[in-house]
Image (tube, rainbow, N blue to C red):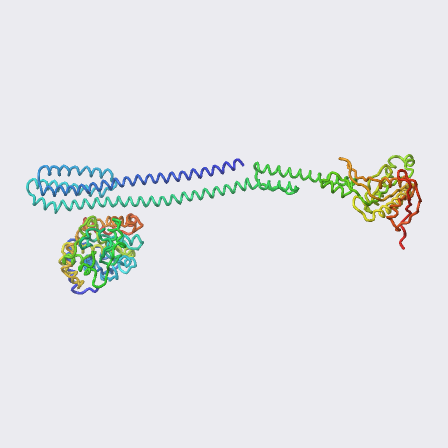
């Protein structure tokens, strides 16, 4: 993604805002092993920190910040593992599955909670009511469907085989749901905000508000193992920038929404703002990323979807050193 | 051997004990893990209790805000203090979670302080402030407590999963170990079996085979057993016995051959063969045979002039020549009686030209007697009688077997000898007619023979010259 002059100025002003909350002394930035970093270009606006972090990354010393568009959300972990992107924010279940599959990637931190919501038409009231129904959303393997699969597995309901999954096409599934041609729709920002604004359906599951999911991260930051091994200082700098960006999303959602809508021209400012207000970005300080990994690994393990124990997943695919250092810098 | 067997059994017992020890170890491990899982379950229950209590406190506070009365507030405060009991239990069952427990206690103390302050505000009628405090402070603290206890629960559940995973791994390892021990035991048993077989069954087989060979009459080969135990001793004894049996067998064979030779001196070979085959009564009717009797003329007077040894020597020389003649003509020597010599042709086997053979024998005997007489300086003359006809031949007696012939033919032949003349060969007409014109004869005419009446007899002179 090309960085415009306007964007750079906007980013820097945001960076200044973010800097107010964070200590200024960053001795590590002069020793970056690389000034290049690549992210996935995620369509969901919930990863706003990733975009607004660009200016912060430049402040940290990065000169080449690149966003790579992926064919599918389901491929995020493969792209990290193959080194096509260096960092990506994604759903914990997908990271757990990838680590169980032996992909060379490492989870560094959680970024925010939320942000899936399962909308349905009457008379659907719970997960089991979905049996045999038509559900719209991202393709299986993407974050939101993976979340729903884990929900079903927890109550012994095979979502993959038990529902008619509708993805893509014209009109898009969201519109089909709006017309009542689909029974349910699994939404992520900004679809959540759009459906809510249009008053379509009712929410039967909200990962932002409903327990236990609201007590765990929805998005974790993962890094390619080779990048982590070769560039530990840069890795920590990226993490700092992302967490600072999350703080900015929490403290000044209007400015961030404006920034996001500028960067991603098609993104509606109002929807972006609604998203930023819905997602409690500031809670990253309160939650435990390790416990999030453990929680989702337990769910996948009990559903028989992974073979590794949670302890092995955490030992093999997480590294909290940088997060702990950042927390120490913030005196958390 | 006893030591070897003892060691083998001890090895098997040791292996079984090791297998049992491994099994006990596995069971002990399973027991430890089960105990650990129970402890983890206790932890989880305690964590959940704290979570429940925190939520319950919030509920009571909310209820008190809506319907404040002194009793409800008192209950809330009392239950808040009881909350500490759950924390103490948490401390008791999860003492190893030091950091998280410290944070739980910290949040709990803050929570107690906030709720206490809330109740004070409610009692003071400052419900709005109390509500604001509930939202701004009590709720986040309750959330934090929930997350912390969630962390504890997740860690405990994760430990349970790890424990189960380790149990499964331990089971797989134990299975490999037990199967390994079982395979090892089988291998050792096979090895021991092979060793015992090599050490025990092998030598026994060797000795058995050796005994079979001994039974088959082979005494030379030795059984080779390297054992220095009872089996080695047994093999040595078998070898020694084999050697002794070999010697005995050789001696026995020699004796047998000697007795066979002796038997052949008194019995014809076919008769000996028949006796060997198990015939006990041998009495054959011979339809055509020729009997010869000879007697040394004036032997009594000659014997009186000679020392006994010399006389025996003389008879020995003479009869040896007769025997040689009989053997060369395939005639059967029947017996000698004093100086008399009896031979038969066509006995025991049929002989087409038995009369001619006996006639040739008679001529040879006469010549031999003359020869021996010349050697000793005494005229030796034989009186020979020959007759042909049917007879009975057989063996008589149960020991000291004698092959003999009986019948009128024999008696007539004897009569021919008795009525013969010194130095001449007296034939019956029957024999004469059998001899045809191959010999020269002198008709003697009619002779009165005792018991036979008048008989036409002949003297055999010599072979008729060919041409």
Q: Name the image quarter holding the N terminus of chain B.
A: top right
Q: Is residue B161 visible?
A: yes
Q: On the image, which quarter does residue A75 sit in?
A: bottom left
Horizontal and vertical percent for residue A59? 19, 59
In this picture, residue A136 sits left or right of residue B125: right
Horizontal and vertical percent for residue B316? 85, 39
Horizontal and vertical percent for residue A106? 27, 54
Q: On the image, which quarter does residue B202 sit in?
A: top right
In this picture, residue B278 sits left or right of residue B139: right
Q: Is residue A22 visible?
A: no
Instruction: List the single residue furthest toward the left.
Output: B125
Q: Is residue A88 above or below residue B1?
A: below
Instruction: List the single residue furthest toward the front.
Output: B453
Q: On the image, which quarter does residue B209 sit in?
A: top right
Horizontal and vertical percent for residue B351? 81, 47
Q: How many numbered markers are drawn? A: 0
Q: Name the image quarter holding the C terminus of chain B.
A: bottom right
Front in this rendered view, residue B383 or A216: B383
Front in this rendered view, residue B167 or A16: B167
């Amino acid at each position: 993604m090309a960085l415009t002059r306007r964007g750079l100025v906007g980013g820097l002003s945001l960076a200044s805002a973010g800097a107010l909350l964070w200590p200024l002394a960053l001795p590590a930035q002069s020793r970056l092993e690389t000034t290049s970093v690549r992210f996935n270009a995620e369509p969901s606006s919930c990863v706003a920190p990733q975009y607004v972090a660009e200016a912060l990354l430049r402040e940290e010393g990065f000169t080449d910040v690149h966003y790579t568009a992926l064919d599918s959300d389901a491929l995020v972990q493969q792209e990290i593992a193959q080194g096509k992107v260096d960092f990506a924010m994604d759903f914990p279940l997908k990271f757990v599955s990838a680590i169980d599959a032996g992909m060379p990637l490492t989870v560094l931190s959680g970024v925010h909670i939320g942000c899936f919501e399962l909308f349905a038409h009457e008379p659907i009231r719970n997960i089991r009511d979905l049996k045999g129904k038509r559900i719209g959303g991202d393709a299986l393997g993407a974050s939101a469907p993976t979340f729903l699969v884990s929900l079903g597995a927890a109550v012994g309901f095979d979502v993959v085989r038990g529902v008619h999954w509708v993805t893509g096409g014209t009109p898009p599934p969201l519109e089909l749901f709006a017309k009542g041609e689909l029974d349910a729709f699994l939404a992520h920002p900004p679809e959540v905000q759009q459906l809510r604004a249009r008053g379509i359906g009712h929410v039967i599951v909200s990962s932002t508000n409903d327990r236990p999911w609201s007590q765990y991260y929805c998005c974790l930051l993962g890094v390619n193992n080779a990048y982590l091994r070769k560039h530990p200082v840069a890795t920590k700098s990226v993490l700092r920038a992302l967490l600072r960006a999350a703080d900015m999303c929490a403290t000044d959602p209007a400015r961030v929404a404006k920034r996001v809508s500028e960067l991603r021209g098609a993104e509606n400012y109002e929807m972006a703002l609604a998203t930023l207000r819905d997602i409690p970005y500031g809670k990253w300080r309160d939650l435990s990323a390790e416990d999030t990994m453990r929680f989702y690994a337990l769910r996948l393990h009990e559903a028989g979807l992974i073979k590794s124990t949670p302890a092995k997943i955490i030992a093999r695919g997480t590294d909290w050193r940088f997060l702990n250092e950042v927390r120490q810098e913030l005196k958390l | 051997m006893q030591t070897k067997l003892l060691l083998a059994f001890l090895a098997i017992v040791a292996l079984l004990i090791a297998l049992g020890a491994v099994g006990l170890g596995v069971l002990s491990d399973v027991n430890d893990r089960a105990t650990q899982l129970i402890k983890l379950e206790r932890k989880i229950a305690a964590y959940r209790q704290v979570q429940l209590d925190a939520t319950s406190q919030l509920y009571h506070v909310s209820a008190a805000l809506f319907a404040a009365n002194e009793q409800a507030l008192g209950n809330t405060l009392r239950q808040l203090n009881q909350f500490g009991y759950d924390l103490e239990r948490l401390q008791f069952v999860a003492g190893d979670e030091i950091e998280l427990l410290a944070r739980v206690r910290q949040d709990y103390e803050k929570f107690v302080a906030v709720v206490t302050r809330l109740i004070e505000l409610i009692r003071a009628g400052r419900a709005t402030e109390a509500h604001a405090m509930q939202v701004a402070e009590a709720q986040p603290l309750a959330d934090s407590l929930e997350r912390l206890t969630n962390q504890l629960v997740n860690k405990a559940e994760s430990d349970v999963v790890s424990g189960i995973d380790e149990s499964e791994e331990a089971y797989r390892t134990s299975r490999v170990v037990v199967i390994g021990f079982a395979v090892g035991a089988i291998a050792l048993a096979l090895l021991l079996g092979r060793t015992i077989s090599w050490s025990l069954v092998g030598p026994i087989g060797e000795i058995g085979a050796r005994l079979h060979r001994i039974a088959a009459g082979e005494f030379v080969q030795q059984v080779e057993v390297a054992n220095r135990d009872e089996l080695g001793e047994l093999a040595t004894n078998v070898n020694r016995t084999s050697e002794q049996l070999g010697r005995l067998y050789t001696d026995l064979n020699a004796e047998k051959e000697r007795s066979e030779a002796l038997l052949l001196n008194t019995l014809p070979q076919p008769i000996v063969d028949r006796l060997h085959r198990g015939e006990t009564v041998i009495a054959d009717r011979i339809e055509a045979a020729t009997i010869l009797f000879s007697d040394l003329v004036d032997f009594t007077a000659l014997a009186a002039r000679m020392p006994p040894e010399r006389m025996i020597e003389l008879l020995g020389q003479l009869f040896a020549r007769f025997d040689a003649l009989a053997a060369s003509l395939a005639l059967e020597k029947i017996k000698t009686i004093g100086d008399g010599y009896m031979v038969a042709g066509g006995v025991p086997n049929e002989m087409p030209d038995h009369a001619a053979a006996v006639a040739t024998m008679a001529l040879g005997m006469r010549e031999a007697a003359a020869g021996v007489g010349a050697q000793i300086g005494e005229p030796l003359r034989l009186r020979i009688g020959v007759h042909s006809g049917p007879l009975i031949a057989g063996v008589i007696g149960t020991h000291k077997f004698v092959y003999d012939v009986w019948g009128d033919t024999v008696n007539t032949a004897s009569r021919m000898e008795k009525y013969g003349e010194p130095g001449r060969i007296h034939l019956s007409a029957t024999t004469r007619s059998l001899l045809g014109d191959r010999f020269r004869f002198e008709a003697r005419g009619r002779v009165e023979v005792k018991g036979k009446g008048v008989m036409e007899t002949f003297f055999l002179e010599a072979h008729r010259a060919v041409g």
